[in-house]
Amino acid sequence: MNAIIALLQFCTILPLGKPAEFDAFARNSYLYPLAGWVIGALAAIPAIFILGDAIAAAASLAFVLILSGCNHLDGLLDFGDGLMAHGSREKRVNAMTDRQIGTGGVAAAFIVILLAFSGLLSVPSIPLAIIIAEVCAKAAMALLTVAGPPCKEGLHSYLHARTRPWFPLATALLCLPLFLLPGSAVGTAAALLTAFLVVVAVRVVAMRLFGGVNGDVVGASSEITRALALVALALAG
């Protein structure tokens, strides 16, 4: 329970009492999808009671961002800055890790949120889709935490050093209950496949441009996966 509480305190703004020992989660980062289940289920609530699809989709996405404290969105902004920077790896890493937000970060956030909203607006069931997409997003974080060699010392290097080879299997098992939800099994499979492909693509880009992965890259993978998983669900639906 300490690991789960520490996970939720890291991934959400939920009032969960006294801070749990973060190392309890660090040794069990395969638990990331559990945060996706919690955030997705809470974010699905507005869509159940709001009749207009556009407003329901916007409200659900807003709840996801608010519940997560925009923590991973901040990673996407930084990742976008690093992508758009010119020059050596060192310059790109500096652009990604400085405190300023540039045009690249704003553009990345705009594109990803637009894709997420468009996908969510096109799915058969908004509540189900936001749950599936959020679990996939957190599964991507878990996989990249294992598979992404750190480019510098920081939070990601701390988590990566405590991963184990069996973590991806445990993460996959936490995602399997998605197939018990009503809806298209093909759509769910497409969303999970999308999460895997995003991890592969983001890792390749990060290794080439930054020489490794950091916390911003992992956070960005969550936002990108959520958006593309929603698009996959819409296309499969």
Image (spheres, rainbow, N blue to C red):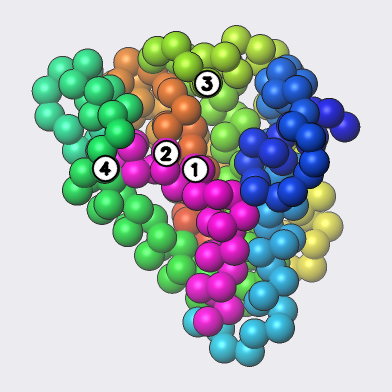
- Residue that mark 2 sits on: 75
Q: Is residue 160 magenta?
A: no
Q: Residues within 10 Å of mark 4 (few under 14, many from 20)?
A: some
> Among all residues in the image, which is located at the extreme front?
18
Of label 1 and label 3, which has the lower sequence position?
1
Q: Position of residue 166 (x, y in %)?
A: 73, 18
Identify the amino acid type marked 3.
Leu
- Residue that mark 3 sits on: 155
Q: In the depicted view, which residue is nearer to us: 56 or 123?
A: 56
Q: CA distance from mark 2 to mark 4?
A: 11 Å
Identify the amino acid type marked 1.
His
Of label 3 and label 2, which has the lower sequence position?
2
Label 3 residue SS: helix
Of label 4 and label 1, which has the lower sequence position?
1
Identify the amino acid type marked 4.
Ile
Q: In the depicted view, which residue is nearer to us: 137 or 9?
A: 9
Is the residue under label 4 in contact with that under label 3 (CB below 8 Å)?
A: no
Q: Position of residue 214 (x, y in %)?
A: 43, 23
- Residue that mark 1 sits on: 72
Is the residue under label 2 in contact with that under label 1 (CB below 8 Å)?
A: yes
Which residue shows up at 34% across the image and 44% down it? 77
**Secondary structure that dominates the magenta span:** helix
Q: Which residues are magenta?
A: 55-80
223 relative position to 101: left or right: right
Count the numbered circles shown. Answer: 4
Of label 3 and label 4, which has the lower sequence position?
4
233 relative position to 30: left or right: left
Q: Residues within 10 Å of mark 3 (few under 14, many from 20)?
A: few
77 relative position to 82: left or right: right
Label 4 residue SS: loop
